[in-house]
Amino acid sequence: MKRLPILPTTISAMIALLALTGCTPTVKIEPPDKPIVINLNVKIEHEIRIKIDKELDELLTNDELF
C-alpha cells in the first residue's frame, strides 16, 4: 500500500474549509421581555345616502308587487 503525498493545495483547501465553517452566521431567537401590545384606536363612520325617484318610491310601496 503506497501512501500518496499530501499536496500543499489540499492542505490549504482544508484550512480554508475550516475557516469558513467558523464564520457561519448565528441566529438567536429570544422572546421579548414585555408582552406585545397592539393598540387599535379605530373610528369607523359610514353614511349611506339613497335618492329614490317619486315614481319608484310609489312602485316600491305597492303591496301587489311583492
Image (cartoon, rainbow, N blue to C red):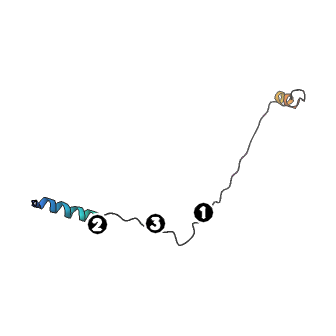
**Residue 38 has which mark?**
1
- Give the vertical position of 65 relative to 51 (above or below): above
Residue 16: give x, y in percent of width and height. Answer: 21, 62
Looking at the rendered structure, the kind of residue marked 3 is Ile
Query: Could you tell me which residue is drawn at 15 percent across and 59 percent down?
Result: 10
Kindly indicate whether the residue at mark 2 contacts the one at mark 3 (C-beta within 8 angstroms): no
Q: Is residue 47 left or right of residue 36?
A: right
**Crowding at label 1, few (<14), some or many (≥20) Cα neighbours within 10 Å?**
few
Disc 2 versus disc 1: nearer the observer:
2
Residue 62: give x, y in percent of width and height. Answer: 89, 29
**Crowding at label 3, few (<14), some or many (≥20) Cα neighbours within 10 Å?**
few
Image quadrant in which you'd find residue 49: top right
Q: Specify the quadrant that holds the N terminus.
A: bottom left
Instruction: Work out whether residue 30 or residue 17 is closer to the camera in this orientation and state it.
Output: 17
Looking at the rendered structure, the kind of residue marked 2 is Gly
- Mark 3 → mark 2, Cα distance in angstroms: 20 Å
Residue 61: give x, y in percent of width and height. Answer: 88, 31
Instruction: Work out whether residue 33 or residue 65 is closer to the camera in this orientation and state it.
Output: 33
Disc 1 versus disc 3: nearer the observer:
3
**Residue 22 has which mark?**
2
- Give the vertical position of 29 relative to 51 (above or below): below
